[in-house]
Image (spheres, coloured by chain):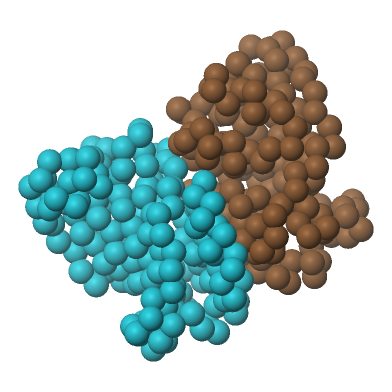
Chain colours: A brown, B cyan
Amino acid sequence: MNTDFLDRLKRFDIPTCLRVCAGTDGSVTFLLEIMTRHDVTVLTEDQHQVPADEDMASLFNIDVGDDVNCRVVTLIADGVPYVYAKSLAPIGRMPESVRTDMTRADIPIGKILREHDIETRRDFDTIEMVKGESLFGCKSVLSRSYRIVHNGDVLMWINEQMPVDERWNL
Amino acid sequence: MNTDFLDRLKRFDIPTCLRVCAGTDGSVTFLLEIMTRHDVTVLTEDQHQVPADEDMASLFNIDVGDDVNCRVVTLIADGVPYVYAKSLAPIGRMPESVRTDMTRADIPIGKILREHDIETRRDFDTIEMVKGESLFGCKSVLSRSYRIVHNGDVLMWINEQMPVDERWNL
């Protein structure tokens, strides 16, 4: 456990459901469904592949130039956007069985991992309040980053941004 | 995903934080810490080993008579009890590195898995309202059961019971 991550999270004076979504070591999409009691829509804003730069190569322990899938999505429940998520995933790292789903749009990561019975752990990196940016009409934004680890390798790096406002009073 | 589990959960008209704890595919102890902003105490009510009966042998795919660790704990935050959890875990199934921690009292399961970098998935079985029982001074009780799977084997079976009342308005 990254105790610094947990300590920081506990100190934030934010709605409980937001703190839960920002802190869970499980699936965020799944939590949103439970909290809102509505289906969650994954709206893909962008998806493309890039050759790994030095930072990506170091993060994933792959070679510079290896293919990396970049995806940006918005998670929406009952018409309300809750999470803006960017992910990076090295194509060659994905288990063969999930590669097609992973590079397809509009399927939540947690659902893919679950449907293919993939065992994982989630390692937290950072959590912070981002100043001077606006998200979904809100000027206060909570940002967290973590890695999904499978068979000891980093399968995916994810950054999630969430607006800090009353929409989380669920 | 057990969609029946999720559908049932969504239909319950219960406090959001209770629905989240009863539905998470991550660590419950960890969620409780985030929700309450207090450390969670694991109070061990009972711990002993039993030889597996037919049902346990079938559940874990082990031989009848193999050692199974039974643990009953209460999860408490800021003096308030939230979860009463029973677990069964076959001793021989535990990774060598975690066996000592697993059979020790007062360490949350999620913390043990995390500290030993164990990759898992959680497979839901049942969720239901239990009638005619009382828990922590509350006459309405939500009960769920699930399995923690590691390397394709069932590492642990867990039943968690949670009182359905206003203590979850966090």
Measured as percent of width and height from the top left, residue A17 is found at: 66, 65
Q: How many marks?
A: 0
At 36% from the left edge and 38% from the top edge, which residue is drawn? Answer: B150
Measured as percent of width and height from the top left, residue A62 is found at: 61, 16
Is residue A90 placed above or below B14 in the rendered structure?
A: above
Measured as percent of width and height from the top left, residue A47 is found at: 80, 28
Left or right: A140 in relation to B83: right
Measured as percent of width and height from the top left, residue A122 is found at: 54, 42
At 71% from the left edge and 28% from the top edge, which residue is drawn? Answer: A104
Q: Nearer the viewer, residue B93 or A153?
A: B93
Q: Is residue A139 visible?
A: no
Left or right: A41 in relation to B117: right
Is residue A81 placed above or below A105 in the rendered structure?
A: below
At 20% from the left edge and 59% from the top edge, which residue is drawn? Answer: B70
Residue B14 falls in which quadrant of the image?
bottom right
Which image quadrant: the C terminus of chain B?
Answer: bottom right
Is residue B32 placed above or below B97 in the rendered structure?
A: below
Q: Nearer the viewer, residue B51 or A16?
A: B51
Left or right: A57 in relation to B149: right
At 55% from the left edge and 57% from the top edge, which residue is drawn? Answer: B6
Is residue A114 placed above or below B44 in the rendered structure?
A: above
Q: Is residue A49 visible?
A: yes
Residue A61 falls in which quadrant of the image?
top right
